[in-house]
Image (cartoon, helix red, strand yellow):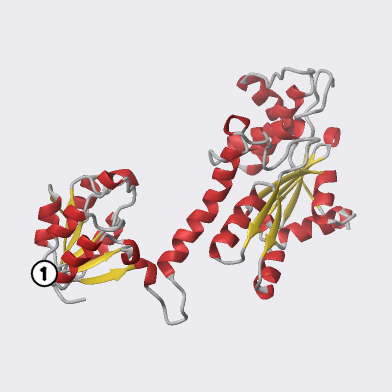
Amino acid sequence: MEDGMNIGVINESSKIENRAGLSPSGVSFLVERGHTVYVQAGAGLKSGYSNEEYTSLGAKIVFTKEEAFGRSDIVLNISPLDEEECLFVKTDQILFGFHHLAVSRKCNLEELLKKNVTMIGYEVVQQENEELPFIESLSEIAGQMCLVISGHYLQTSQGGRGLVIGGVVSVPPATAVVVGSGVLARSAIKALLGAGAHTIALGRHMDRLRELEETSFLQHCDIVKASLQEVKALTGCSKLLASVDKIREQGVQMILVTMGNRGALAWFGEELYHIPACKPKAVKDPTGAGDAFAGGFLAKYTRGREPGWCCCVGSAASSFVVEKVGSRRFGEKAEVYERATEIYEKGVKPLSQDAFA
């Protein structure tokens, strides 16, 4: 890029386009290299970027689309230019965007040809290895959205079957079929596996399908919480330590295994600890105890508390859930902390892994 070029970013919100042609960090990158960036007011609002964020990193705010085109050597947009925008284009200007010229209106094409513009379409930018970086990024997003959209249309209010994608206790997960093995398909499979769906991939490229077969949702987990039976079923191993090792091979950093009235085992990295069980006043119904443990643990862990204390809070929370049938009572915060403190002070004891070999 030539020194001291003028670069414009237009506001496309009137075209139902939420993306911005350039982020504030992109502005900083260009300004540091001696370029001037003009951003039309409001261009980044729907992407979560305020005018002040742009100006703080060196952009100049302009207030009309015509001015953004008029001041710029290069214009960055997202959606194809409409008829008004084509009229604002200057002779010999450089235009970056998703142009989709094959479906553009004839009058727009004629206007752009008359002005001898240089158009670079994000959809056709190709690297030396023939990858399409812009399209791949969008495909990853689209793959993640497959989970959200499919969940929406599975609702009975949308004419769906009322299925929960990941399943619940006594109800199996939904079965999802992903056609293809490219970037979008891989992203969709990652999202569906993470949600617990039974996922089937169909495609023509056997090498890609083999790679997908090796994909485990555990590769995307930092923490795994499961019961003793679940952790063995998850890995297909009959021995607890072998099951844990198999999970850790996927990069999981923390593993919590609940064992009912025997408490829980917690692997924090290489260290193994025993978490005592909080004694409830009565045991009426154990359903939901594991979920309460996970909720109590995460409530503290996401606030930066020490993992051993977080596990004790989880144990205390689960002890309240089992005391009643039906409508659950989780206990007031003070009550949960009182039970958690009792077992925490007894000691979250480190254990030797040899005991589970």
- Position of residue 33 relative to residue 47, above or below, is below
Q: Give coordinates of residue 283: x percent, y percent.
A: 84, 21
The kind of residue on which mark 1 rests is Thr
Please state the horizontal and vertical placement of residue 198, each as a whole percent of the image. 73, 50
Q: Quadrant of residue 264?
A: top right
Residue 102 vs residue 322, the one in the foreground: 102
Query: x, y percentage for residue 320?
Result: 74, 22
Residue 161 position (above or below residue 196): above
Q: Residue at x 34, y 62 (%)?
A: 103
In this picture, residue 106 sits left or right of residue 155:
left
Q: How many residues crowd mark 1 within 10 Å: few (<14), some (14–19), many (20+)?
A: some
Query: Which residue, given by chain and number where applicable, does mark 1 sit on?
Result: 91
Residue 210 in view here: yes
Q: Position of residue 355 (x, y in %)?
A: 88, 53
User: Which structural element holds mark 1?
Assistant: loop
Q: Is 22 rendered above or below residue 347?
A: below
